[in-house]
Amino acid sequence: MKMAEWEEVERILKKYSTKEDLIPVLEDLQEEFGYLSEEMLERAAKKLNVPFVTVSGVATFYSSFRLTPRGKYHIQICRGTACHIFRSDKLLTYFEKKLGIKAGGVTPDGKFSLVPVNCIGACAKAPAMMINEKVYGNLTEEKIDKILSELK
Amino acid sequence: MKQISEILDVEKGKKELEQDRITVGVATCGISAGADKTLEKLKTAGLSLLVEGVGCAGSCYAEPIVTVKQNGLLSIYGYVTEDKADKLIESIRNSQVCEEMLLGHKLEDIEFYKKQLRIVMKNCGFINGLSLEQYAANGGFTGLANALKLQPSQLIEEVKRSKLRGRGGAGFLTGMKWGFLAAKQGRKFIVCNGDEGDPGAFMNRTVMESDPFSIIEGMIIASYATGAKEGIIYTRTEYPLAIKTIEKALVMLKDKGLLGKSILGVEGFDFDIILKKGAGAFVCGEETALIASVMGKRGHPRFRPPYPADKGVYDCPTNINNVGTLANISKILAMGVDEYIKIGTEKTKGTKDICLTGKVKRTGIVEVPMGTKLREIIFDAGGGPVEGTNFKAVQIGGPSGGCLTEADLDLPLDYEPLQNAGAIMGSGGMVVINDESCMVNVAKYFTAFTRSESCGKCTPCREGNTRMNEILDRITKGLGTEQDIKKLKLLAEYIRDNSLCNLGKTAPNPVLSTIAKFPEEYDAHIKEKRCPSKVCIELLKYIINEKCTGCGACARVCPTNAITGRIKERHVIEQAKCIKCGNCYDICAFNAIDRK
């Protein structure tokens, strides 16, 4: 890890002190760096005075934590019930084909990462997805093409 | 004690609500349909009317929703996407109603709302969710003021008398729950459960985004009733807009002294709230798992007792109420318990906000009195299944619930009748399924969901649901045997009886209800190796019929070169090579490919 990154990690950790803060710590680190590296988990464990195994246990339990870098645009395909009824499984396959990566992967240029997610709560607009924090609804393959072409 | 009108400029809020203005629903549903762009366009159009973003009114099907109040006349418009906004702007400039996009002049004009009674959703989509003045002007904080007129013990009796039942799904009496906490001494907590993980449910998200103060007001009332001085709102990380809205709302309330020390100047009435984000785990909706997550641990449930009322956050007595329950509280105490108990059924009072989704014409949030027939929700409000298809089932209650069929549609919306029919009220998600969906595939979907979301602590849920998923996967691939139904039932019983938490105990419900209601679909898959709804691809067969003109289009899109034939002659699909991708079926312009 570079010096500047270390400093950033330390700056985030400074805000927290108790073991109950573990999830917010990991959330903040991930928000800053896009993922959680082993070094970051080690630092968090030291700072909050909890065993590394606990930190890694929490980081791997919750699905929103990533241990590998994500793309500039993080695409979450909703796999909730309503989206399933609208065949969001096919849209996931479409994305895999279009981006040339499997679910869970990142494009080689680091631009896109793709994951299925269990319900984003946009069920009335199924099938839906989230790219970073923006929700898109009533998706079709054509719509996906248009949305992706607009992401620079 | 200070009055709300001393703290907030209620008159200003009133004026804002009464004056001519334009609103755009910019909650998540609206934004997903492009409402943010519509809002921007209306704001920059140089209109003389005030343009304001509001929450979601629940009619998600017609998003983006715009309301225009001009010369005192309210018009509610639907489907106002960015490209159609120009037309609306033109109409507004000419002081005309834009008939083309008009849904109605009041909610009751609109088919979707005719059967609705909006209590929890009252403010949603009509006030700026982050305007304390508008909230107060529309009846906000009346519930709190009324609550403070009572002694805490009297207040709990009032809540008991309202018969309000927990809206998270279990339906436990809220007043009783509060009573348990009030009886405890020392440090205690009020937790608002906003971890709405049920796929198909988004009512909590909508209220958090559209009317956050009503939830927090409910928590303040709960604090007064129970003596808890610390509050926590736990929200899913998948709801970024709800998180931001709640964060802002908390800051505003602290600013005005409605949270913190001596609320409304009442000596000793101290209550503060912090926001905790989940990190993506369905199981954290379960109260003991939620507590573990709040404490920074893996979201593992634990045995009860001890119940959270004895041992919760920091091992202190804790009360966990759903977002919907708390939003109800502020409204119930504002309207008065006597009025409230006139609504609903004998056992269950009030309304329920239902998320109607799936293959139904009008999707969104339908808030109806308890006891309303399911048919009225799905067919009157929702307009029935999408054009050209038939109603097959409605899935109620998410991964803990079940499917009901046409024969069940006259059931009243209430906890017990739904449970007796094989579904549950749950958080109130209803996914309408039409004849395009395969029920075995739906059952498989739910076991896959539970398999990925099981926390893994207890074996029956972790292994049992995995085995169920494997069996169902086999059936959908044409490898099922007649023993499989028996095995599924046996596993279901085992998982139900031996799982640690309610999520595990109820996980077999979607499977059992599809087996009970759709035995013929299981039979077709297992005995005839056929998927009647043509969803399970391994069971499909593509055959070229005599309509084939030999154009060769299908052969060109076949990824495995399974289609052969001379040009202008009927082609043939070599079944052994076919991977059932359906490319040929989609491209054929002559209906020459049969899918069986």
Image (cartoon, coloured by chain):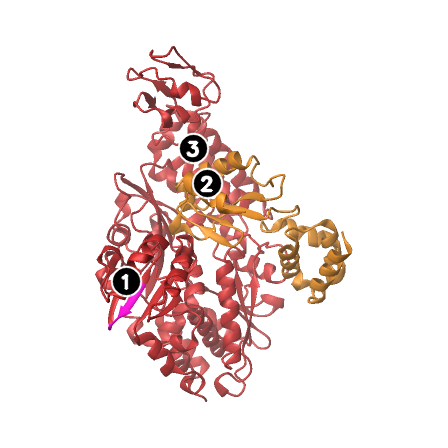
Chain colours: A orange, B red
Amino acid at circle 3: Ile
Chain letter of mark 2 equals: A
Q: Secondary structure at mark 2?
A: helix
| The quarter of the displayed image where residue B574 is located | top left
Residue B104 location in percent, x, y? 23, 61
Q: Which residue is mark 3?
A: B485
Question: Label 1: how many residues lie within 10 Å, few (<14), some (14-19) or many (20+)?
Answer: many
Q: Which residue is mark 1?
A: B76
Amino acid at circle 1: Ile
B253 in the magenta segment:
no
Q: CA distance from mark 2 to mark 1?
A: 32 Å
Residue B24 location in percent, x, y? 36, 63
Q: Quadrant of the C terminus of chain B?
A: top left
Name the residue rendered at 69%, 66% in the picture: A16
Residue B266 location in percent, x, y? 50, 87
Q: CA distance from mark 3 to mark 1?
A: 51 Å
Q: Secondary structure at mark 3?
A: helix
Q: Secondary structure at mark 1?
A: strand
Q: Work out whether residue B510 can be spotted.
A: yes
Does residue B532 appear left or right of residue B326 in this picture?
A: left
Q: Which residue is mark 2?
A: A145
* Range covered by the magenta-colored residues: B67-72
Does residue B454 appear left or right of residue B331 in this picture?
A: right
Name the residue rendered at 30%, 51% in the picture: B362
Chain letter of mark 1 equals: B
Q: CA distance from mark 2 to mark 3?
A: 42 Å
Question: Label 2: how many residues lie within 10 Å, few (<14), some (14-19) or many (20+)?
Answer: few
